[in-house]
Image (tube, coloured by chain):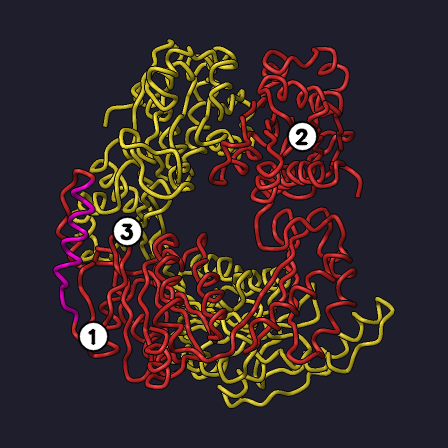
Chain colours: A yellow, B red
Amino acid sequence: MARSGVDRVSASRVLRTAQVLAVGSELLGTTRLDTNSLFITDKLSSLGIIVRSKTVVGDDRDTITDHCAQALARVDLVVLTGGLGPTDDDLTRDAVALVTGLPLEEDPTITETIRGRFERRGMRMPEINRRQAMVLRGATVLDNPNGTAPGQFLEHQGRVLILLPGPPRELRPMLNSLCEGSLKERTADERIYRTSLFITGRSESHVEETVQPIYSRWREETPPIETTILAAPGQVELHMILSSSNGAAATARLRAASGELAAALGRHVFSTDGRSMEDVVGTLLLERGLTISAAESCTGGLMMTRLTDIAGSSAYVLGGVVCYSNEMKRDVLKVAESDLRDHGAVSEPVAVALAEQVKSIAGADIGVSITGIAGPGGGSPQKPVGTVVIAVVDSSNVARVRTFQFIGDRAQVRFQASQAALEMVRRQLVYNDPISN
Amino acid sequence: MARSGVDRVSASRVLRTAQVLAVGSELLGTTRLDTNSLFITDKLSSLGIIVRSKTVVGDDRDTITDHCAQALARVDLVVLTGGLGPTDDDLTRDAVALVTGLPLEEDPTITETIRGRFERRGMRMPEINRRQAMVLRGATVLDNPNGTAPGQFLEHQGRVLILLPGPPRELRPMLNSLCEGSLKERTADERIYRTSLFITGRSESHVEETVQPIYSRWREETPPIETTILAAPGQVELHMILSSSNGAAATARLRAASGELAAALGRHVFSTDGRSMEDVVGTLLLERGLTISAAESCTGGLMMTRLTDIAGSSAYVLGGVVCYSNEMKRDVLKVAESDLRDHGAVSEPVAVALAEQVKSIAGADIGVSITGIAGPGGGSPQKPVGTVVIAVVDSSNVARVRTFQFIGDRAQVRFQASQAALEMVRRQLVYNDPISN
């Protein structure tokens, strides 16, 4: 079988590029997104096939036909999802027939399979379901154990078209078997390798200025490493992608590249394997056998919510206090009335007192506090919206505190505050110093 | 101004169809979806402009150019999002220049605005940011108060191109003003009207069974009301859509339709205007002048995070305790050791004690508690993963408690638990009864 697979590669075109075409008016509304494309991209990229673009079209024959024809002129593989149902709105088969000029022919085996599915449930097959048995001449039928609509695999003028049903539980097993069989046989030995670095506390432009001189060289090397920089909430992400037929060499090269960028960016790199900040901090706490507690004001519990998003976090998160009101700060967390009065709730003395108290109340190794002005109201000339004070008290009861000025709307200020607090904890655990750059 | 707007409609082509082109390699990966298109579709459809298809393309000049040229041949309006940043990867401006044949020219006013943004934060503008000041000849510059990249609005050979930045908080206000101005002037009289009902505590199929006999009639009426049912985390959404040139009649008809469905669904409807659960509960608390506090175990602060997502929530959220460890439940919230031992932390007696104590500690009118097993570990035959106990203590100190069995992964169980707790508070405030159906 492996031998036959190799033969077929030499006979057919090797698939390198793909386009996904999701068919369905419901995917063009205001509430639903095409999520199948994430799975398809993942599966194809594991075979070294790059998805160049993905399109959502409504149940309109002309629009589907138009996009499908243009996709065939652009890429080696077109994956169509949806529009394989039995109704008049299900137009994917018809559109592909128009584009390729191939006739649709009823496959009586499929009709009988569909009829059987209905009969096993004590129902008569509606006549419209015969539409689902219409197969493009020359196409291979893909079984669908989870639904009525079979898929189709078609080679046409050196390109490949795949028609898959829209429901994820029908589409996924079908694509999984194609990736083990017909698709795998048509790919090059080349595979795609990826790695990433996540950075916090630096803007996208500053990261770009630091790393651009390094990664720009890689584009000239063979094979090139493609580097993408992406600003996400509270972090900047660097993604490195390499296409290679030598897995060990590719992995070693990406590791060296990642190491070079990480060295240039220093302590601002918090993740080198795609893990989130809460996951990285959680693992550090677990490894060191330390527990954590937090007193959160402006973030309203967001930092603890993020830490406890991670399964198994009860091993190191003890809990804490959401001290949204000044009374909670004073009565539960024993902040001195005079500190609240003289310095205000958003101040370094109050932040330190909150972190010390919550650590003591929870009996934790580490205490964190976040107090600030998330906006849109509550700002003043001295403390504008976005002012956030964060304190970390370590296991030797040393308190360190820092005042931040975040930019953005309420949700962004809150997220950045939770991210900065987690980053201070990470710095404390890794460098024994939560503050210096 | 209105008069001039009418004139311009007669002078320019009326915009009826659109395509969205989202630019960014990160949107072609396996983790991120283009969510801007939902907002764009909503805004355009309110002007009667139909989105025929939407495409995601990577940061590749040829692919962007290719798709953009084909879109211009297909629809009246092309909306491009993303790719307006300062780096070499940001290619939207260049691609549109290629497609239209129009030169890019630096607008010194924009350069100075960007420089000013950096200087106000005490930073020097990196030279690469000058790329963001490059404007297509003849385009109108769209101000971006929330970022460095301005948008562009271009009429070209009877079509319209709009270039918008990718971050939603930059894109949204820009598109909002276009929909009040340049875009509105170029649309037909027909508008699309929408309304929605959000339901919790009922499955999608139960909602469908209840409402299908009602909404199926509306499809036969002129003009028809299209009804879509959508399962979202912790809620089911019913969306009703109507296309009409008579705004008053359309609004009245949708209001009556929404009322009919709401009557059939009873107390399970929590929102009739698209507002989230935390927003609805916050408004009720504000209107009644009541304050709230919460003791959260398995949700780790998620309910309080959601309540404090709403601006102005400090008027009614006092705070609370994240009692992840049993010691926090015992020492801070004074739950009897015997209750923890005899009933377990996930039990109705413990939930009631937690809600009563947090209400008392915070000095709040309402106390809520959530204790449960979010998984993946920690389940037992008696209390499997997904078991969550929620208690609400009202302002007369009457405690009511309910045990739920949620289905799903850790994140789904946690979200449903926070949703059910907020729903119990809403029922308490509206019906003085947090529990009965």
Residue B214 is marked as: none
Q: Residue B298 in the image: x percent, y percent?
A: 61, 30
For image coordinates 44% across by 54% down, the residue present is B32
- Marks 3 & 2, CB-CB < 8 Å contact: no
Chain ID, mark 3? B
Q: Amino acid at mark 1?
A: Gly
Q: Earlier in the sequence, mark 3 or mark 2?
A: 3
- Marks 1 & 3, CB-CB < 8 Å contact: no
Q: Is residue B236 above or below residue A363?
A: below
User: Residue under circle 1?
Assistant: B138
Is residue A84 or residue A376 the one in the foreground? A376
Q: Dividing the image into 4 quarters, which one contains the C terminus of chain A?
A: top left
Q: Are marks 3 and 2 on the same chain?
A: yes
Magenta range: B104-120
Q: Amino acid at mark 3?
A: Gly
Cα gap from disc 3 to disc 2, whole angstroms: 42 Å
Residue B111 on the magenta segment: yes
Chain ID, mark 2? B
Q: Earlier in the sequence, mark 1 or mark 3?
A: 1
Cα gap from disc 1 to disc 3, whole angstroms: 23 Å
Cα gap from disc 2 to disc 1, whole angstroms: 61 Å
- What secondary structure is marked by label 3? loop
Q: Are marks 1 and 3 on the same chain?
A: yes
User: Residue under circle 2?
Assistant: B372
Q: Dividing the image into 4 quarters, which one contains the N terminus of chain A?
A: bottom right
| Side of B135 relative to A10 (left or right) | left
